[in-house]
Structure formats: C-alpha cells, structure tokens
Image (cartoon, rainbow, N blue to C red):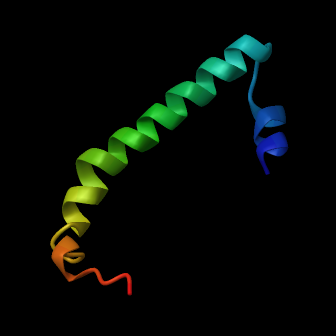
Amino acid sequence: MYAALWRLLPGPWWVKLFIVLVLVTAVLYALFWFVFPWISPIIAPGEVDLE
C-alpha cells in the first residue's frame, strides 16, 4: 500500500517526502484537535480495567 502511494505522488523523492510529511502532520492535527476530543467522553480512562 505504501509503495503504491509513493508511486502515485508527483515529483522527485524529496518532493514526495515533503508531501508525505505534510499529510501525516495534517492527519495528526485532525486527530488531536477534532477526533480525540470528540471521542474522549465516550471512552472514560477511569473505567479501563487491564486485569
């Protein structure tokens, strides 16, 4: 899957690397600012039991 994504990206390797870094940063930003706060009331950390 990653090889197919790498082949689809335009430009030389350093442009591809920059695009991948921007995409990873955007996904992490979306997760931390939108997804995790939305889901945190659903998953209460005090209710987790690992036994």
Q: Is residue 34 left or right of residue 6?
A: left
In the image, residue 36 sits, relative to residue 45, either above or below, namely above
In the image, residue 20 sits, relative to residue 1, either above or below, namely above
- Residue 34 lies, in percent from the top left, at 25, 52
Q: Is residue 34 left or right of residue 21?
A: left
In the image, residue 2 sits, relative to residue 16, either above or below, namely below
- Outermost residue on the front side: it is 51
Q: Which residue lies at the image location 78% right of the left edge and 34% below the top edge?
A: 6
In the image, residue 14 sits, relative to residue 6, either above or below, namely above
Q: Nearer the viewer, residue 8 or 39?
A: 39
Q: Quadrant of residue 10?
A: top right
Q: Nearer the viewer, residue 41 or 16?
A: 41
Q: Which residue lies at the image location 21% right of the left edge and 63% below the top edge?
A: 38
Q: Which residue lies at the image location 20% right of the left edge and 58% below the top edge?
A: 37
The image shows a total of numbered marks equal to 0
- Residue 16 lies, in percent from the top left, at 71, 22
Q: Is residue 20 left or right of residue 29?
A: right
